[in-house]
Image (cartoon, rainbow, N blue to C red):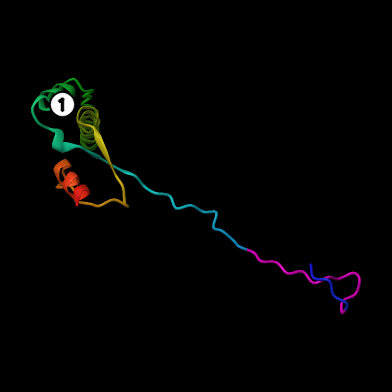
Amino acid sequence: MIPSDCFTMQHKLLVVDVEIRSTLRKRTVRVYKVKWWNLNGENVTKLFEKIKRGQWRLEGDSNKIWEKMAECIRRSAREVLGVAREESGRMKGAWWWSEELKVKVKAK
């Protein structure tokens, strides 16, 4: 408050600095990708066996059957091969960034 003689006793001049922050946060959608590059050697047989033992209920509409089969394959692939989270802030297409290259860049 700023005391002043030009105002009556009931009124005082009030100066306020206000900073308004946005309370809304951006929701980030995380994308999980199956590590299909792990599909080699022993993982091929593991995935095949897991899909073969899957819950195959061939009842109803062909679209429902297709969705059930696709979901079973996706779930089995996630369990056997693993998933990688794709983040928006990271370099995309950095599959070539090997441990050897990291050591050389760090040394430089």
Q: Which residue is at a point 12% across and 32% down the rendered structure image?
A: 39
Residue drawn at (25%, 36%) of the image: 83
Q: Look at 9% across and 31% down and name the residue there.
A: 40
61 relative position to 14: left or right: left
Residue 105: x, y in percent? 19, 50
**Between residues 27 and 90, which one lies in front from this camera angle?**
90
Query: Is residue 14 in the magenta section?
Result: yes
Dividing the picture into quarters, in which one does residue 74 lie? top left
For label 1, count other residues whose C-alpha is less than 10 Å away and answer few (under 14), some (14-19) or many (20+): some
Please state the horizontal and vertical placement of residue 87, each as a whole percent of the image. 31, 47
Q: Say which residue label 1 marks.
A: 47
Pinpoint residue 61: horizontal percent, then vertical percent: 24, 34
Is 35 within the magenta?
no
> In the shown orientation, is residue 15 left or right of residue 27?
right
The residue stretch that appears in magenta: 6-18
**Residue 20, position in %: x, y?**
59, 61
Q: Name the secondary structure under disc 1.
A: helix
Q: Amino acid at mark 1?
A: Leu
